[in-house]
Amino acid sequence: MFGQHVTQELSAYAHGELSAGASARVAGHLRGCRRCRAGFAEIKFGIRLAESLPTRDAPASLWDNIEAALSKESAQSEQRHAARDARPSRRAPLAFTFGKQRALAFSLALLVVFGGGAWWLYMRATRTSWDVSRLAGAPTISSSRITDTGRLAVGEWLETDATSRAQLKVADIGQVEIEPETRIRLVETRLTEHRLELARGTLHARIYAPPRLFFVETPSAVAADLGCAYTLEVDDRGRSLLHVTSGWVALETRERESFVPAGAACATQKGTGPGTPFFEDAPEAFLDALAKFDFANGGTDALDAVLREARPRDTLSLWHLLARVGTDERARVYERLAAHAPPPAGVTRDGALALDAPMLKRWKDALEPTWQQESVPAARKLWRSLWK
């Protein structure tokens, strides 16, 4: 039914104007509703189009010309009234005159409304800095110490030492807390994209916005927010670990993408990109084998252990592995995945083994409800064992 759609909320959602709960509800609806996704795509296209329009200063004579036009119209109206009064009363010219005056007033009102709207869009699109609050110690922006508050401009670095912490207001769509020993840069901020670069350290992001509006670049992958809260760590060698506490995050490179739901984590490594996502409550033997397969050339032995230790909930990892193993091993991964979660209607064995994209997405959509569960965080333990 139409009432079940979120069409009327899409504009506010696109501009980050909904509450956290409403934003999460709309994001969840968009993941499963093709009709509303299409409407949302049209709104984002309109925003991008507005951003692409060149900005020009209004001529100083603009309002003078408008006032002159109004004065001229008023004088002409008085002349028409005088001429009308000198003639026998006729209703049609009076209605015509009033109609013209109303049309002119309406046109001017539209000019003011659209002019104000264009100015509002322009101001939002050209925002070039974010608010920064000091939480502890002495964080710096471009080597200048922050007392209580400051502004981080595009291109500037925010750094914290061993005793300092800070908070960033991500335009009007969320917050990012910066932990000690962190170096981060504001890369871009505009209506359709807000982007940070995390060179090292730890951040905690909470975003109330449409999917793929907030991005964090790391040396080994890009974290694309899908409406969520998460922690992202980067070590001195450029390796990272993502831990998602609500919603979804995608870790991306040109060659590979990992989808990480709440309660799950994913590691990345320079030259490899994102590894295989995993739930943090998975058996230690499973996590160790998965780390060896992704980053230590574990090969067949590591894959054997992954398949042996995988629980029904670990279909998250198995689904991703389908596209990450060789042709000879893919049938084994398929059989293990299908044993825990048989493919839905429309997904065939041959299609899955051929990595048919629509089929794999259909299977993923069927699996997602089993992935929507919180778990006890254990990512930091894996982090220490993985990178020692």
Image (cartoon, helix red, strand yellow):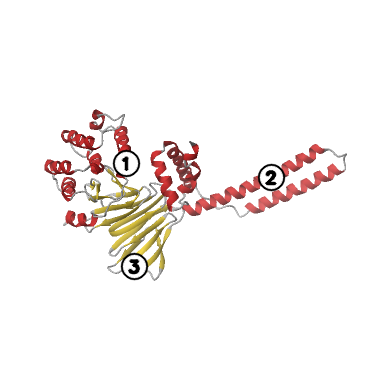
Residue 142 showing in the rendered view: no
Q: Position of residue 386 (x, y in %)?
A: 18, 53
- Position of 216 with respect to 302 (left or right) is right
> What's the residue at 31%, 30% (across, down)?
345
Q: Which residue is mark 1?
A: 368
Q: Position of residue 61 (x, y in %)?
A: 63, 53
Q: Where is 53 relative to 179, above or below? A: above
Q: Position of residue 328 (x, y in %)?
A: 15, 33
Callout 3: SS:
loop
- Position of 117 with respect to 313 (left or right) is right
Work out how far the residue at label 3 is from the one at label 1, CA to CA, in angstroms: 40 Å
Q: Which residue is mark 2?
A: 104
- Position of 159 with respect to 48 (left or right) is left
Q: Which residue is mark 3?
A: 139
Work out how far the residue at label 2 is from the one at label 3, CA to CA, in angstroms: 56 Å
Of pointers 3 and 1, the one earlier in the residue sequence: 3
**Numbered tag placed on residue 321 in the rendering:** none
